[in-house]
């Protein structure tokens, strides 16, 4: 049995990209592996949430994880800040992480381009904290989206560097993991990039969105004037809509609109209406379960307490052993 670790930032609602990028696979992983799934509230501090938003975001992500089908009896579902050992491992790894390699991280360069007023040290060392999250439980597998591959590669770099420096084989090399041949990247509705809350509310379909909101978002999705010749390659914005339809619609529905595009008879309005209908059908069970869990505070508290206890057992062992390897021993 292999160890799997994955986390989602505690910035509130989960979206379609979260589900297809990772959570869908979690449901199988928890039956076949030793899994640690956590809410990354430390990571969210790079955007300076208010105390109320931080707390509410953590609770909401736990609820939505559960609504998606994660079973706290089968896996370890915990809050990152409930396990202080992650910050100690983060510090130890930072001592052997170099500014140049952190500055070259694609996500860091993108963040400072978009938010030049908020270039904080947490953003720079984000990959080191992510590495600590993974190495804390000595994971073998990490379910990540295409955009997170570089961070996982940096985790391997930090783990291997630690092994070389201290002449040990303590940390294994975690690998990207899903059940397909390629890592999943769900596109957004804005015509480019990926689906994500940071790209704007209208870019993502959230699992607790009501029907009217979902329909409104999809009907506003970016399109063009349509193909001008048969079998014309699709622009990125159009391909994005087809990619999303492939995730939630029936195969014959997708085939119908593929044929319509290829013979230049497609009506994007009709396609969006069908996609909105299929999306609402897909999201409805998640939304209903989320609403049900939101009123069950006692159960949510018990899930968080159970996850903390299970995560601490693994984390305490790892940090104790790492401290001994580094040289923190009784004199």
Image: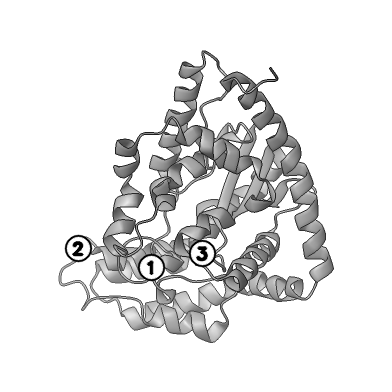
Q: Position of residue 123 (x, y in %)?
A: 40, 52
| Lower position in the chain sequence, tag 3 or tag 2 | 3
Q: Quadrant of residue 31?
A: top right
Pointer 3 residue: 16
Q: Does the image show residue 159? A: yes
Residue 199 numbered mark, or none: 1
Q: Is residue 180 left or right of residue 224?
A: right
Q: CA distance from mark 3 to mark 1?
A: 14 Å
User: Which residue lies at the image location 71% right of the left edge and 35% below the top edge?
Assistant: 316
Give the structural element (helix, strand or loop) at label 3.
helix
The C terminus lies in which quarter of the figure?
top right
| Lower position in the chain sequence, tag 3 or tag 1 | 3
User: Which residue lies at the image location 69% right of the left edge and 44% below the top edge?
Assistant: 30
Q: Is residue 12 left or right of residue 310?
A: left
| Lower position in the chain sequence, tag 1 or tag 2 | 1
Q: CA distance from mark 1 to mark 2?
A: 29 Å
The N terminus lies in which quarter of the figure?
top right
Q: Position of residue 78 (x, y in %)?
A: 69, 51
Q: Is residue 79 left or right of residue 12?
A: right
Pointer 2 residue: 232
Q: Position of residue 238 (x, y in %)?
A: 29, 68
Give the structural element (helix, strand or loop) at label 2.
loop
């Amino acid at each position: 049995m292999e160890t799997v670790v994955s986390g989602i930032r505690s910035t509130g609602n989960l979206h379609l990209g979260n589900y297809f990028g990772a959570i869908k696979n979690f449901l199988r992983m928890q039956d076949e592996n030793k899994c640690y799934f956590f809410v990354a509230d430390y990571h969210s501090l790079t955007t300076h949430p208010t105390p109320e938003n931080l707390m509410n975001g953590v609770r909401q992500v736990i609820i939505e994880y559960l609504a998606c089908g994660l079973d706290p009896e089968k896996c370890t579902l915990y809050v990152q800040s409930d396990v202080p050992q992650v910050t100690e491992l983060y510090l130890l790894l930072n001592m052997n992480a170099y500014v140049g390699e952190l500055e070259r991280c694609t996500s860091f360069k993108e963040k400072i381009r978009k938010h030049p007023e908020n270039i904080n040290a947490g953003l720079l060392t984000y990959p080191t904290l992510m590495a600590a999250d993974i190495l804390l439980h000595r994971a073998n597998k990490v379910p990540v989206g295409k955009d997170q591959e570089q961070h996982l590669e940096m985790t391997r770099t930090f783990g291997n560097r630690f092994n070389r420096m201290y002449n040990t084989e303590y940390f294994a090399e975690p690998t990207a993991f899903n059940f397909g041949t390629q890592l999943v990247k769900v596109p957004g509705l804005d015509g480019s990039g990926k689906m994500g809350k940071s790209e704007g509310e209208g870019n993502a379909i959230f699992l607790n969105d009501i029907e009217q909101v979902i329909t409104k978002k999809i009907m506003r999705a970016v399109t063009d004037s349509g193909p001008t010749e048969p079998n014309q390659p699709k622009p990125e914005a159009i391909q994005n809509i087809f990619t999303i339809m492939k995730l939630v619609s029936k195969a014959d529905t997708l085939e119908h609109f593929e044929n319509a595009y290829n013979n230049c008879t497609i009506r994007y309005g009709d396609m969006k209406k069908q996609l909105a209908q299929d999306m609402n059908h897909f999201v409805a069970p998640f939304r209903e379960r989320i609403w049900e869990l939101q009123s069950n505070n006692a159960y949510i508290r018990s899930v968080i307490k159970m996850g903390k206890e299970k995560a601490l057992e693994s984390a305490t062992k790892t940090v104790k052993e790492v401290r001994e390897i580094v040289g923190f021993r009784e004199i």
